[in-house]
Image (spheres, grey):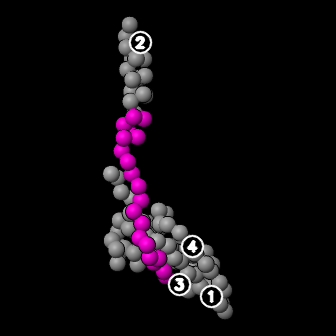
Amino acid sequence: MKALNIALAAAVLALSVPTVMTNTASAYQCRTNYTKVKVHKPTRMAARIQARKSWSYKVKTNQGVAWSVWKIAKNKKIRCKKSGQRFICKARAKACLYVVQ
């Protein structure tokens, strides 16, 4: 009887979790304008990494930390080219904010 009650409780819990999860709506609110940065570094990888960091810093400074997450930004693009002994990378994206409604 005790095993049956445990199994029944587990089944009820398993069925109720998806319902709870789907009742909460979430979405991204994104800016309409691009934030753009340009960096110079000795290697392509260093320039790409710094471009993402610089983009996040610029957004955080101007719009707040909640908007500065590169991973959830919209229309992200990083373009790099070699110029002499250095690489120039330009990053641009539309900052987004994760909102739970």
Question: Does the magenta portion include 20?
Answer: yes
* Outermost residue toward the front in this view: 32
Front residue (pair 83, 27): 27
Q: Quadrant of residue 80?
A: bottom right
Q: Is residue 43 visible?
A: no
Mark 3 touching mark 4, by CB under 8 A?
no
In the image, which disc is placed on residue 3?
A: 2
Q: Position of residue 84 (x, y in %)?
A: 66, 92
**Earlier residue among tags 3 and 1:** 3
In the image, which disc is placed on residue 77?
A: 4
The 10 Å Cα crowd at callout 1, few under 14, some 14 to 19, many 20 or more, is some
User: In the image, what residue occupies the spot 47% across and 66% down?
Assistant: 73
Q: Quadrant of residue 48?
A: bottom right
Q: Position of residue 87 (x, y in %)?
A: 62, 84
Q: CA distance from mark 3 to mark 4?
A: 14 Å
Q: Amino acid at mark 3?
A: Val
Q: CA distance from mark 4 to mark 1?
A: 20 Å
**Earlier residue among tags 2 and 3:** 2
Q: Is residue 72 visible?
A: yes
Residue, disc 3: 39
Q: CA distance from mark 2 to mark 4?
A: 55 Å
The 10 Å Cα crowd at callout 2, few under 14, some 14 to 19, many 20 or more, is few
Q: Amino acid at mark 4?
A: Lys
